[in-house]
Image (cartoon, grey):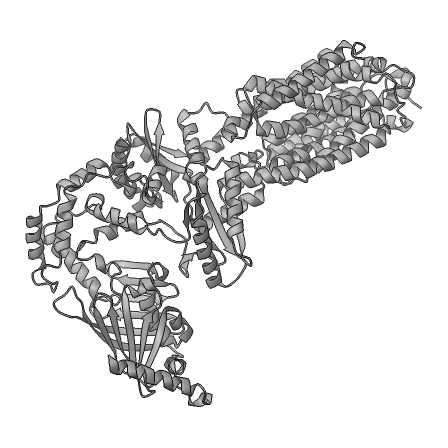
Amino acid sequence: MISGRRIECVVLAALLSLACLPAAAQWDAAALLASLARSGPERIAYSETRRLAYLDAPLTSSGELEFRPPDWLRRSVRGSGDSYVISGDYLHIEGAAGSRAVALDLHPGLRAFAESLRATLAGDLARLQRFFLLQLHGDEKSWRLVLRPRDSEVAALIQSIELSGVQARLRRIETREAGGDVTVTELQAAP
Amino acid sequence: MIRRLPPALLLWLLLLGGGLWFIAARVTVVSDMAQFLPREDSLEQALLLDALREGPASRLIIVGLGGTQDAAQLAAASRRLAVRLGDDERFLRVANGPLALPAAERERWFAYRYLLTPSAPDAFAATGLRRALTTRLAELAAPLPPLDKAYLPADPQAAFRRLLAGWGEGNAPPLHHGVWFAADGSLALLLLETHAGGLDLDAQGAARAAVLAAVEPGISVLLSGPGIIAAASRDTIREEVRWLSTLATAVMLTILFAAYRSLRLLLLSALPLLTAAVAAVAVTALAFGSVHGITLAFGITLLGVAIDYPLHLFSHLREHENARHTLWRIWPTLRLGVLSSAVGYLAMALSPFPGLAQLALFTVSGLVSAALTVRWVLPPLLSTVPEVHVPRRAGGRRSGRGLWLLSGLIAGATAYLLVSPRSLLETELSALSPVPPAVRELDAQLRRAVGAPDVSRLVLLEGRDREAVLQHSEALAPALENLRSTGVLGGYGLPSAYLPSAATQQARRAGLPAADELAAQVAAAQSGLPFRAGLFEPFVRDVAASRELEPLTPEAVADTLIGARLAALLRPYRDGWLGLVPLHEVRDEAALAQWAAQSSQPLRYINLRQATDRLVERFLAGAGIYLLAGLGLILLLLWAGLRDLRRVFRVVLPVLAALAVTAALLHGFDVRLSLFHLVALLLVLGLGIDYGLFFARDDGGEERARTGHAVAVCAISTAGVFAILALSQIPLLHATGLTVALGVTLSYGFARFVRRGAAGSHRPE
């Protein structure tokens, strides 16, 4: 805990001092997101482990993420064939039972889940900041971006979402929910 | 002074004063359309209309926010407006997005979930529970975890989720930035419900002002809703009537002053009008108990014709002649004209349609009292006569051989009307409504945008109490679902969807297992699944607690949002209750009507729009018949008065030609004839006969010129005033103005065309 806070202080101090330096030398959340921004469509395989307070054993799943800039994201689950498309202000769930659309705005928690990944892949810092407070740790080679919900209603559901990666690659998402549930999503390196 | 007043003048003053007192103290003006239309159809329908007028549908206000392309800014404005109006006690409900139950209500409904939602027969046995748990496990594993995860230990069957889903809006508008938007994204939408009923126009006006005041600058706002429209159209009508009547009065005064060059005559010409208005209102109120707003607005314009009567007198005034003598010269002609006008309306006064009868009685009593005022009141006031100079050429000298031509015109116009494939008559009730078309169009646009349910199609359920109605509603569900799945209709809103009957709740309660029994089933269902042991203890506890609950009744939930929606669908009726089941997107009217007719349940299918259209159609057909009857009476009267068939033709043909051509012209310009057009045509008939009668008098020289002058002044002033009315946005005034201005102009033109030089010796010039 203490070491985490010290790192934060160091990063903060570094950021403050870097602010005086020429733009080319800066590396901050804006620079990170700019490097993450995808200019074309992309498919990424993932695997996920979820540890829930309700369950004795973790749940695992895997599938594929497909992102089309600026705001279209599909998550297809291997095995079930279900797919979750986040597009505009709606989440479309398509499965064997048919499809339905859920308005993201109806469920701020859902909106936060959706934007944490979509805005990151789009490199949209402003959008990300609209929903989360951002903390950046590490350096350009190995970084960790911690998102905490701004909205108190969302914060009651989601404690934090931690994105980490190497250079311009997002590798791992760790979602901590308020009840103690933790989901870890590993993204495989692009082929 | 007073002793020297002629008795007629004294009587007139007394009657006028009494009438004014009666109007001020006793007369009420009603504005309810239902009172204008025939209502012998069924009490039930009238009651239903009442319910719809007073019910939540009438209290709805739709707000559209626009003025910027930035959707986020509009959404923020919508949210702030909702907060501000939410604190305003004038509003019962302020919604800019889907139903969000207040936390306190949520708790209440959650406790009753096992009585309010249906469950599978084995839902509380190991098999059913196992099914539910497997589904929940899959949801927990899904990429986006279920949002109601916190409820899982107490509600593994997601009964509460199903309850909430059942209450959701059927076809709500799309959501952007968390609030409702029109489909094209140009408007952020809000739905408001006022505490006050839709007919409380002052309260509706205040609600409108409150919304306008609460919208922030830079945002434009569109508003609609039955109450808003009623309040706004009242203001529009006041405003329009003010400037139209000012303009019309100015035009009238200018014409009259140009014709007579006497201020005194100008003032005197107003007396018959004033008398006519007072008498008409008083007599109508005495006969019907109240005066309808439409009668008042429309009738007063019809009475404008009474200005003609003093004009005939004034134009015929000669120097050094007692006004009494002048009057005697023209009185037989004037009397015949007034009587024929009155007789035309009298037929209508006997009609069983309250609106027509009222309008007719109003007009007849007004016209007769105006004529009596000219006959008895004006001459004594004209003891010193200002000389009225009449240009000699006003007499005209065209010899009449136009009768054949006019007959041809009548035949041609009638043939055109009969042959034309387009519908001649306007049967939409809205055409009678005093609301400007632009306002109605805005309302339709906003309604489409919010997907506000069309309340014109309904199934009615009857029961001895609310419980019975709810039970009927439940029994109806399978049949309606079948109609929906076969595409006959798109959706329906059953009262029992908000709250099941007590009987159903009791049956569900009886099916709930005891705590230890359920605990054993849960343990069995859970085996082999990764759920923690003891996780579902809250579920077992809640089910056990539900066994002790008393069923919820509509009264018990009346203070909740859902209870308010339910109350809108349950109405007291006679000594029982009615359930309203609104139907949406009805695609196969015939199939629906057939199903309703064959159903064994105590239900009735009602299409309000069709019902009102039929009503108006019957109303118009009735009006047409009474118009024809009136025409017949007029012809009889004229023949009795003139005793000369050729003269009757000379009087009647020009105006009939004018009527036929006016109707054909209106039809040619794609105007459908409404009740107002028909009554306006009757007015033209009266005027035209008046012109014809005066033109047909056997006289010559100066008298002939004076008659020509009188008729010309009458026609010009009437056409001018009604042409101004035609400028109005209000359908009623526009229709009347256009028809009368056109009809009078043609009528005068045709009448002059056939005016013969008086037979024999009096030929002028």
Identify the residue at image location x=67%, y=29%: B301
**Which quadrant does the C terminus of chain B fall into?**
top right
Q: Position of residue B635 (x, y in %)?
A: 68, 17
Residue A80 appears in the rendering: yes
All told, the count of numbered labels is 0
Horizontally, residue B759 falls left or right of residue B693, namely right
Say which of B64 and A85 sits in front.
B64
Residue located 38% across and 75% down the image: A122
* Residue furthest right in the image: B765
B522 displayed left or right of A126? left
Residue for point 21% across, 56% down = B151
Q: Quadrant of the N terminus of chain B?
A: top right
Most foreground residue, B93 or B737: B93
> Up-down: is B447 above or below B323?
below
Residue B627 visible in this rendered orientation of the protein: no
Residue B486's x, y, as percent? 31, 45
Q: Is residue B535 left or right of residue A10?
A: left
Task: Give how far across and how far down residue B648 sits, in percent.
Answer: 74, 17
Where on the picture, by quarter, is residue B25? top right
Q: Residue at x 15, y 46 (%)?
A: B545
| Vertical side of B242 occupied by B107: above or below | below
